[in-house]
Amino acid sequence: MRSQPNAGVNKTLLSGVIGASLILFGSFGTGWLASVSPLNRDPFFIMLRTESSGVILCVILLALGCWLLFRSWWRLGQKLRDWGEGSLKIVRRAVWLWSIPMFVALPIMSRDAFAYLGQGRLVVAGQDPYVDGISSLNNWFQLGTDTMWAQDGTPYGPLFLSIEYLVAKLVGGSTDAAILAFRAIAFIGVLLCLHFVPKLAELHGVSGAKATWMTVANPLFLVNFVASAHNDALMTGLSVWAVYLACKRHGFWAIVVLAASIGVKPITLVLLPFIGLLWAGPEAKWPRRILYWVYSGLIFLALMTFVGWLNGYWFGWLDVMLHYTGSGFSIFAPLGLMTVAMTSIFHSFGLESTGVLPTISTIGRLLGVGVAMVLMFRGKYSHLVQRMAIAYSAIVVLSPVIQPWYLLWLLPFFAVTGLRDDWQMLWLHLTTIFFLAYQAADQIFVWQFLQESLVPRVQMISWGTSIACAVYLVFFDRKTKSIVPDLLSSTNWLTKEKKA
């Protein structure tokens, strides 16, 4: 008999829809709105956003929604664990069903989309977003932009500036319409991943359905790339498409698509030399590889010069990329922890610590580039995409700032080359659990007149809800409590220690 990969799956898909719907309802009281938004004058939103009880209710709904969606993702993986015929279709259906409620949610976990509108307004005003901060515009704060963007040049590429310009021209000053537009643009990236992740996985002998489940159906992927409307979704989708084209030896078009990805966020420039190696082919010797690096570089340079000439910003994106340091550090980033430790040591000796972060950031950047350089020259052709993923990871991880969605840049490339069902899959699960809990409690919108008394309380409530849900799913839920022990028992170095 043929296996039925959809046996019992509809209930799991429905539970995911309920989880995504709870996220939607939770966003009504905790999501970001510009002060000029008409929704702020709606009685329903006033009730949820100006009363402590309404905010607390929405915080709980948001957290519960994240964990119900996470449980649905886990259960879907269990029910499709053989990854047989029809599994990919089910995973794709899950992505669509779980995305729809979040598509109309208020922005949660980030308000970068408001900065996108501000940068588009800069272009409309004839200013240079690589030089001018958003604070040079009238009403920039009322239109929802975070103050961290006030003076900084944009870290985005020239293609995304053109997209921001078109959105700003289209919606005018309507922030709500702009959010929907940027979310639709981000969803294009989700669809690109949904299409090309399984194709790229199959080229590496990995189940396309499993790779898609690990990445695109992942709740962390959906909340960041749909609900938060991060432009990283478009960048990631284009980069996966480019690597697929390179693996199929369509080198010219791979460079064109990668240039578009770099035109959204320049970080994917690190993929360019690996695209050149893929284009050169498995039998290529070093003279041919170097020649294809030259081809790749010249095509990329010509494309970016043309785009720079069209919009008049030329290579302003490159200057920002080389000098952009971000803001502060992340406490969960390795170099962020090192910064905290070194700063404490300097203070204990009464020394000035202002140079600690820039120094550590520079060292990390150099180390990341060094790792990428080694991986460009060492390793088998058959492992080239995996080498590229590790090089990409080195650039990201060896930075003082790691945002949760940065990890989603990397995940597709590790998924398509195969994550084993041992500590590797366990690492994916635990990372998703941690960042889902972190983001559910981070960047919660609370009106200023409620902040002093309410913000610490709702963050504690969110963390408490997340910890309780995670503990229940890992240790007590009769359907999911076997997942972590099974992965631990499959980890060879752990089982060897037990036998010893």
Image (cartoon, rainbow, N blue to C red):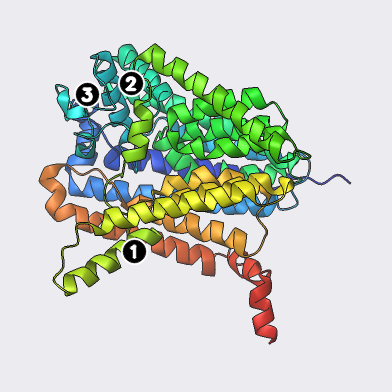
Which of the image's four quarters has the C terminus?
Answer: bottom right
Give the mark nearest the N terminus, 2 or 3: 3
x then y, percent, for residue 466: 39, 59
Give the mark nearest the N terminus, 1 or 3: 3
Residue 177 is tagged as 2
Residue 111 is tagged as none
Q: Does the rendering let one see residue 332?
A: no
Q: Nearer the viewer, residue 421 or 290?
A: 290
Q: Residues within 10 Å of mark 1 (few under 14, many from 20)?
A: some
Identify which amino acid the numbered label 1 is placed on: Leu
At a point 27% along the width and 67% down the height, the residue shown is 342
Identify which amino acid the numbered label 2 is placed on: Ala
At a point 58% along the width and 47% down the height, the residue shown is 389
**Mark 2 and mark 3: Cα distance apart in space:** 11 Å
> Residue pushed farthest front?
287
According to the image, label 1 marks what residue?
A: 337
Q: Give the label, 2 or 1, closer to the camera.
A: 1
Q: Nearer the viewer, residue 308 or 262?
A: 308
Badge 2 element: helix
Residue 38 is tagged as 3
**Mark 1 and mark 3: Cα distance apart in space:** 42 Å
> Residue pushed farthest right?
1
Q: Give the label, 2 or 3, closer to the camera.
A: 2
x then y, percent, for residue 68: 48, 51
Identify which amino acid the numbered label 3 is placed on: Pro
Q: Is residue 153 above or below residue 416?
A: above
Asked if residue 227 lies left or right of residue 292, the reply is left
Badge 3 element: helix
